Image (cartoon, coloured by chain):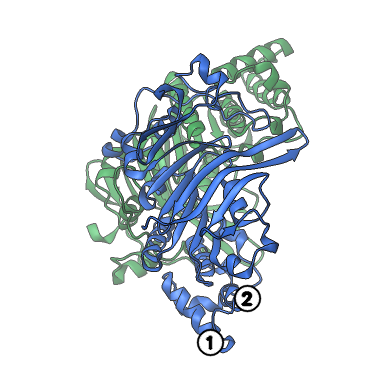
Amino acid sequence: MLLEINDLHVYYKSYWYILKVLNGVWLRVDKGERVGIIGESGSGKTTLLKSILKILPQNGIIPRGEIRYDGKNILKLGDNELTKIRRKEIGIIFQDPMAALNPVFTIKEQLYDIIKHKMMIEGHNPSSKELHEQAVKILNDVRLPDPERVLKSYPFQLSGGMRQRVMIAMALISAEKLLLADEPTTNLDVTIQDQILKLIHKLVTEKNLSTILVSHALGMVYQMTDRVFVLYAGDIMEEAGTNELFNHPKHPYTQLLISSTPRLSSVGVGEGIKGKIPDYRNPPPGCRFAPRCPYVMDKCINMKPGKIQVNRDHVVSCYLYD
Amino acid sequence: MSNYTILSVSDLRKYFTTAEGVVRAVDGVSFNVKHGETLALVGESGSGKTTTGHVIMGFYPPDGGKIIYKGAYELSIPMKKRPLELKRDIQIVFQDPGTSLNPKRLVKDIISLPLLVHRIVDKRRVYEKVAELLEYVGLSEEYMFRYPHELGGGEKQLVAIARALAPNPSFIILDESTSALDVSSQAKVLNTLVKIQNELKLTYLLITHDLGVVRNISQRVMIMYLGKIYEEAPTEEFFKLPMHPYTQMLLSSIPTLSEEDEKIKPRGIESVGEIPSAVKPPSGCRFHTRCPFAKQICMEKDPPDIIVNNNHIVRCWLYE
């Protein structure tokens, strides 16, 4: 087990109120495993990824929970050890490269910085020639044509697809064990998305990395992962092997989500889900999906359902299977 | 669907002058929309699909070509000079309901404005009509007294649809109307669009990049790339027999959710390259820089219209 998260709670403090976003999330990632997290906008996907690296915004607090990475509890680690993990072991691809790359520095400056700090962790202070070699190599790895030109460019001078490749390159430098991908292709066209996904897949397989892919695009998660967690309003609703989950979804939320997705082979989509994601200031005390659930029962409203094992590799958090 | 052509576009051109040069956003586009159908205009960002829709709406005048609406109106005239009757008849639903609805107005005011401008109902009955419209798109009366920020994405888009329906239009442009939504709210919006189209005999021009949506609500599909249309076919046939290499590349790039969907995807083609700049589009067929089957002639001459059958047209030298 490379990463194991138990009962993770994350709140955001604001002047007037507290947003109770993650509500006891669990997650596990084995070595070399590709895990997907499905969630719609506002479900807490990004918050979850950020808490793994402990890079939550200043107002984010973790009142309860445990994140065990490689035997260590990330939440209890000191700054030095965390820095080591961030620079050398876990890399993250952010959603919007335009926001994640610094607009006033060239790609070269940003890439050199990351490579240099990683090498310094390894106890080696690289010369500028070494930095350049490394940077060109990593840009070649992500199939960027003309790396010399890319190095000299500012982020705005590159196309969306190229910026995302630079982001992947940066994430790969520090991902020796685990790669986190937060909606890595949201702003890209479908043909470019396909190229990027294939690239990530290839690199991850070559380096035998574990990955967590977070997305609202079900098709992408179906194609790219071995196991899937369904996140809704800060709660894990269901966990199963990818094929099992998409072919035999158990939780009403998962079922509705899958039936709402338009298909290429047939006409007609499900009716969708009425209402909207709950207000995190005052979330439902029981199952957080209860207000929108067509099968809601009395106990759903008052008490959060626990994990229910429906078969060997399938866990669902729903009273219907109690 | 009837055979009467509601909108006829021929050789439409729209150029924009920028610091880098002239962007040929729409460069000789022709198509007809039949009354009561949904015609999908599909393309990636930068293909000119939204510009085409906006020129039809009259947001800016075209630089060439003709747009004839209902056989009588010439749509090359800008929005401001159009007769009120024409403005009433063509409506649009934008991509992001978060920015297309006025955040300072209550839903009732957002929907009643077009009712009053076009004198659809008597002033005293206006809120009755608003409630009726909301009911019609599947929202309850209570939504009248809410502000847009109090609604979810799907609900906001339904309000935008109700607003577009208010003046009884016969033609609606759906400009990426469901792309900003989560799948769970998208489903509701798609189903509502299909329902109101059937009941009110509306005609839709669906501008989108999502072929899953296309499959579900449109009868015909056009594929646009760098300002030109390269393939046009009825939806069924389009998914059964995609011909243009670009169409095949698009279809093969979609991450699918099931085995049946996987079978639809063309094999033997892989996505390569990026869409070139529209300032200096490639010569000949504009797709040749990314096309795995490109021949000498593709770089030199624009491909002709190849008529596969009655309704299926492809522009590609491969089928010459």
Q: Is residue A287 visible?
A: no
Q: Is residue A285 visible?
A: yes
Which chain is tinted blue? Answer: B
Foreground residue, B204 or A228?
B204
Where residue A210 appears, as percent x and y from the top left, is 43, 29
| Residue receiving disc 2 | B117
What is the distance, in whole Å, between disc 1 and disc 2 at their CAs?
A: 14 Å
Image position of B169 with respect to A252: above or below: below
Foreground residue, A226 or A210?
A226
- Secondary structure state at the residue bearing disc 2: helix
Q: Residue drawn at (63%, 36%), measured in percent from left and top? A: A79
Image position of A6 with respect to A145: above or below: below
Where residue B287 appears, as percent x and y from the top left, is 53, 27
Q: What crowding class fits label 2: few (fewer than 14 Cα within 10 Å), some (14-19), or many (20 or more)?
A: few
Is residue A165 toward the left or the right of residue A33 in the image?
Answer: right
| Residue receiving disc 1 | B125
Amino acid on which the number 1 mark rests in the picture: Arg
Q: Residue drawn at (69%, 63%), measured in percent from left and top? A: B81
Q: Nearer the viewer, mark 1 or mark 2?
A: 2
Which chain is tinted green? Answer: A
The chain to which mark 2 is attached is: B
Q: Residue drawn at (57%, 89%), measured in percent from left and top? A: B124
Q: What crowding class fits label 1: few (fewer than 14 Cα within 10 Å), some (14-19), or many (20 or more)?
A: few
Where residue A65 appears, as percent x and y from the top left, is 47, 49
Where residue B105 appears, as percent x and y from the top left, is 63, 73
The chain to which mark 1 is attached is: B
The tag on residue B223 is: none
Q: Which quadrant: the N terminus of chain B?
A: bottom left
Amino acid on which the number 2 mark rests in the picture: Val
Is residue A75 toward the left or the right of residue A219 in the image?
Answer: right
